[in-house]
Amino acid sequence: MSEGISQPDQPQALEGEGKDLFSKFDDVIALREGLLSSGQEDPFNLVMEKVLSPTRAICNGRDTILLGTYNYMGMTFDPDVVEAGKQALSDFGTGTTGSRVLNGTYQGHKEVEQALMDYYEMDHAMVFSTGYQANLGIISTIAGKGDYIVLDIDSHASIWDGCALGQAEVVPFKHNDIEAMEKRLKRIPEGAGKLVILEGVYSMLGDVAPLKEMVAVAKKYGAMVLVDEAHSMGFIGENGRGVVEDAGVIDDVDFIIGTFSKSVGTVGGFCVSNHPKFEIMRLVCRPYVFTASLPPSVVATACTSIRKLMHGSNKRAHLWENSKALHKGLKDLGFKLGTEEPQSAIIAVIMPDLQQGAAMWEALIQGGLYVNLARPPATPANMTLLRCSLCAEHSEEEVGEILSIFEKAGKQIGII
Amino acid sequence: MDRAEVDTKIRSLIEPFNKKGIAIKDETTFQNDLEFDSLTVMDFVAEIEDEFDIIISMNQQAEIENYGQLVDAVTKLQAD
């Protein structure tokens, strides 16, 4: 008998008892358990049992006003959009079961890309399966090893992940700081590829980037510019093309990234561009190639929704009214807000700390109002935020109701 | 600028960020000893970049864990 057989094939007592690859999450687990042990309803485990409209749902058994969705233009229940989805589902089936570059491009995918080209008046549009993948794919593919990416420190996770995947040199600058951005661009070695990444609306505080100045600076240093307009599409700018349109720089940016999961009201992501070689991205962009394309019903709803958003100026006007009314109302009640003036459809209410933020969130949900609880590390400067995102379908009366729920909860928790 | 001069400059730059007044040695780590969070890192790096007119990309920052490594990196970067 060989000696080896009687020996266990692994050491019997593992070093660091009870430790494994999950040990790195222990702090997060403890934080969460601490929060929930006080009887707190879990802010990250809410279930909508029934969705009544873009602004109402039954959440955890209660009729609730939705003020924490990205359904800015209220397109999710639009009869034309719903009908287009049903038709595509019957005509083309439930899914494509394949990549865009193999068997996954249907008529509907081409139609939604045409709708985007018409919407932005740009030469090229490429649709991804999610907004996250649009950033991941475009950024990692165009900025590789040896190239430089200069970006705002408050950029979305999908932007950071795109930077990491592409292995470019990543150089962040202080949020919305034009001078800090210029200093960094100035120091990049001559001849290196340069990409500046900005967002139209920053989703945590709902503030807008000074794109007019920033895009001009980027161009001065010969950098390409990518702007993520996820939170402004449909709403900001005369034709709802985003902050780039509002700032008058849409023709100076090289890439606009957007999503179908906010104003468009379904799921998916895209990039539009006028770059003459843009179409090659379809072959070299791995997060585009190595994933299944969107289901036919999704592209059909997106296409119909985008075409309707082109004529959405009345809805845009009403959404601005809602944003102004909620901002003023919350400010008058004594809440501390993320921006001095309303700049987008997002109003962030700053909480003193996570404990009180979570308590406030619970008081609101029990009062019939859903908002997003945002906490570090997703938030800038380690803030705890109650993020309110408005919808064009919120009525004036609903905004009033929202304010009275905030007032009651704020007094109960002792924040105002 | 030689290493000693870079060291002196960075020592004065780090002061306002060294909230607990920790004695800075080459082995002092930014994350554990100085407890820098990501925003502090950004502000501190910006100060150094402006002082020496260099870029320390996040990729380079990932390699720098302690004070001595930072002084080495900056000495090299500003000489290039």
Image (cartoon, coloured by chain):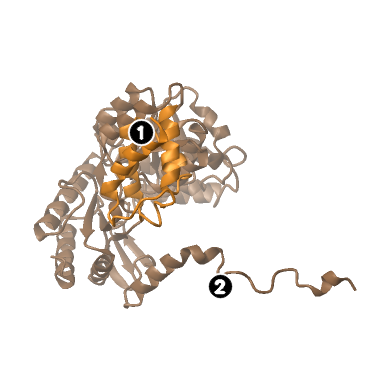
Chain colours: A brown, B orange
Q: Do dots 2 and 1 share one subunit? A: yes
User: Which residue is located at x 52 percent, y 48 percent?
Assistant: A295
Q: Give the residue number, with chain letter if any, for mark 2.
A: A18
Q: Amino acid at mark 2?
A: Gly
**Where's residue A321, x and y in %?**
16, 47
Residue highlighted by disc 1: A119
Q: Mark 2, chain letter?
A: A
Name the foreground residue: A117 vs A336: A336
Q: Is residue A145 above or below residue A6?
A: above
Instruction: Please provide percent x and percent y for residue A57.
Output: 32, 64
- Quarter of the image for residue A405 reads bottom left
Q: Please, what secondary structure does the residue beneath circle 2 have?
A: loop
Asked whether A242 or A253 is in front, the reply is: A253
Q: Amino acid at mark 1?
A: Tyr
Counting from the top left corner in percent of width and height, residue A240 is at 28, 37
Q: Bin the neighbour count of mark 2 within 10 Å (Cα to Cα): few under 14, some 14-19, many 20 and up.
A: few
x then y, percent, for residue A254: 39, 28
Q: Quadrant of the N terminus of chain A?
A: bottom right
